[in-house]
């Protein structure tokens, strides 16, 4: 079970940041440079989505 599912009080932005951290950890254990880069790109996308979600909740 993903970490964020066991902590119900996290908002969407925080959950997305946790997903990004998970991707960053996968990148650290990647067996080759291409896979590492893909995990890091995915992490960057999760962080961007988290930032966007935070902005949207601030505007609401």
Image (cartoon, helix red, strand yellow):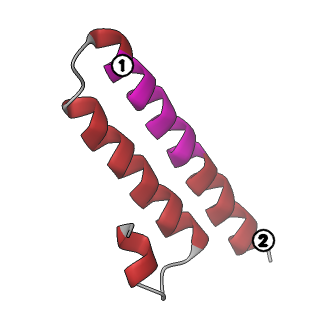
Q: Which residues are magenta?
A: 35-48
In terms of image quadrants, where is residue 27? Answer: top left
In three-dimensional space, the C-alpha distance between marks 1 and 2, rounded to whole angstroms, equals 36 Å
- Quickly name the residue at label 1: 35
Query: 58 or 45, which lies in front?
Result: 45
Rendered image: mark on residue 55: none
Query: 35 or 47, which lies in front?
Result: 35
User: What residue occupies the far top of the structure in this picture?
Assistant: 33
Rendered image: mark on residue 59: 2
CB under 8 Å between discs 1 and 2: no
Residue 23 at what x, y percent from top left?
37, 42
Relative horizontal placement of residue 47, taking residue 24 as reference (left or right): right
User: What residue occupies the far right of the structure in this picture?
Assistant: 60
Q: Main secondary structure of the magenta part?
A: helix
Disc 1 crowd, CA 10 A, few/some/many (<14, 14-19, 20+): some
Secondary structure beneath label 2: helix
Residue 6 at what x, y percent from top left?
38, 82
Secondary structure beneath label 1: helix
In terms of image quadrants, where is residue 34? Answer: top left
Residue 38 at what x, y percent from top left?
44, 22
Query: 50 or 18, which lies in front?
Result: 18
Residue depicted at 26% across the width and 42% down the height? 25
Residue depicted at 24% across the width and 25% down the height? 30
Q: Is residue 31 magenta?
A: no
In the displayed structure, 36 sits above or below 42; it is above
Relative horizontal placement of residue 51, taking residue 22 as reference (left or right): right
In the displayed structure, 51 sits above or below 6; it is above
Residue 32 at what x, y percent from top left?
25, 13
Residue depicted at 66% across the width and 61% down the height? 53
**Is the C terminus in the top left, top right, bottom left or bottom right quadrant?**
bottom right
């Amino acid at each position: 079970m993903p970490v964020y599912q066991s902590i119900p009080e996290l908002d969407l932005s925080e959950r997305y940041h946790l997903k990004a951290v998970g991707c960053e950890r996968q990148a650290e254990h990647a067996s080759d440079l291409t896979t590492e880069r893909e995990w890091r790109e995915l992490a960057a996308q999760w962080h961007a989505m988290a930032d966007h979600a935070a902005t949207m909740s601030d505007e609401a």
